[in-house]
Amino acid sequence: MAKTPLRVAVTGAAGQIGYSLLFRIANGDMLGKDQPVILQLLEIADEKAQKALKGVMMEIDDCAFPLLAGMTAHADPMTAFKDADFALLVGARPRGPGMERKDLLEANAQIFTVQGKALDAVASRNVKVLVVGNPANTNAYIAMKSAPSLPAKNFTAMLRLDHNRALSQIASKTGKPVASIEKLCVWGNHSPTMYADYRFAQIDGASVKETINDDAWNRDTFLPTVGKRGAAIIEARGLSSAASAANAAIDHMHDWYLGTNGKWTTMGIPSDGSYGIPEGTMFGFPVTTENGEYTIVQGLPIDEFSQERINLTLKELTEEREGVAHLLA
Ligand SMILES: NC(=O)C1=CN([C@@H]2O[C@H](COP(=O)(O)OP(=O)(O)OC[C@H]3O[C@@H](n4cnc5c(N)ncnc54)[C@H](O)[C@@H]3O)[C@@H](O)[C@H]2O)C=CC1
Ligand SMILES: O=C([O-])CC(=O)C(=O)O
């Protein structure tokens, strides 16, 4: 028997990430090739944005996706999020050359109070929320705090692009396929302070750290390359990453919903106090997922270098949070 369609709300649907994301959700890449979906698409109440959204929807229609069970356009989060099982909060201003993601805080924070409240009011009580709009961790924190009647664990931030970037750099350094790399993780904020950690990573059972055996490469090449990859793409393309961001959003939701079969991935999630990260901080952690729930990988030793990196990214997140405290008062 055919499965009941799941409702997927996407904000910023006419933007550049939306243009890569929606087609893949409708194609079954996110929730499975046997799972029908209904797309509930939100754009700002601006004639040009709504017209562009209509254009994207015409193209989605023209793909005749067998799994697409319905699609609606919205200018109000209260209708866009109605009964949503999944919400991908992409809509926000992107950064331009020379900006850091936290420079977007003022411009974007407001959006996530409004949308958190709307999710609280109308979404499914089990809604799984992924915040992509930058600064993603703090925006996810704002949305979570603005939705007190929903479980905090339902709110997540996207660190998966950093995770995938790190995988790709390690694959290229070791000459091994990305699919062979396991037990990689990224700690902290989706910003240049994030700490991509391959100390526990393995390729076919062999330690990645021992295979690479080059702490200077880790410190001076790997971490800056992964941390500043977003800026490098803006510099090269004149626009921030879009298809790779959409791909990471698909990976994040896919793994959250369908499970990782014991494998590690990275999600930005509200801390439960693990590894000394204050409870509620929206922080990148190594997780495994099963039955729609994530679990933090416990008991990893944190050496001095790693602790310094974790402290740095935590400090930045704490400052960002203090910067938006007035919005949550
Ligand atoms: N977490 C991550 O790894 C990544 C995050 N990003 C972030 O994703 C966000 C979107 O990026 P792009 O799609 O490239 O930007 P874009 O400017 O192409 O599209 C954003 C869309 O969101 C819409 N929008 C703005 N406010 C909205 C609201 N309140 N409700 C609904 N829609 C709204 C805009 O009208 C626009 O169509 C940016 O904040 C960017 O920095 C981008 C790449 C990676
Ligand atoms: O760098 C940006 O502004 C967009 C983004 O978050 C990324 O590509 O990681």
Image (cartoon, grey):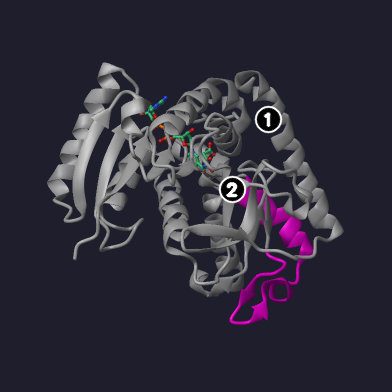
The three-letter amino acid code for the residue at tag 1 is: Glu
Q: Is residue 213 visible?
A: yes
Element assignment for label 1: helix
Nearer-the-camera pick, 266 or 256? 256
The answer to if 201 sits in the magenta stretch is yes
Quarter of the view holding residue 305: bottom right
User: Could you tell me which residue is drawn at 62 percent across and 68 percent down?
Assistant: 183
Looking at the figure, which quarter contains the C terminus? top right
Magenta region, main secondary structure: helix
Label 2 CB-ligand 1 distance < 8 A? no
Residue 130 percent coordinates (x, y): 48, 44
Q: Residue at x 18, y 41 (%)?
A: 59
Residue that mark 1 sits on: 320
- Pinpoint residue 19: horizontal percent, then vertical percent: 31, 41
Depicted 264 relative to depicted 88: above or below: below
User: Residue drawn 25% across and 63% down?
Assistant: 34
Where is residue 168, by image quadrant?
bottom right
Question: Marks 2/1: CA distance?
Answer: 15 Å
> Farthest residue in the right direction?
304
How many discs mark residues in the rendered view?
2
Question: Horizontally, is 316 left or right of 249 in the view?
Answer: right
Give amino acid for label 2: Gly
**Residue 56 in view, yes or no:** no
> Which residue in the protein does label 2 denote?
268
Which contiguous range is marked in magenta? Answer: 198-227
The image shows residue 185, relative to residue 127, as above or below, that is: below
Assign a secondary structure to mark 2: strand
Determine if the magenta segment contains residue 162: no
Identify the disc placed on residue 149: none
As displayed, is residue 247 above or below residue 191? below
Coordinates of residue 255 in the picture (x, y in percent): 46, 60
Lateral position of residue 199 relative to residue 78, left or right: right
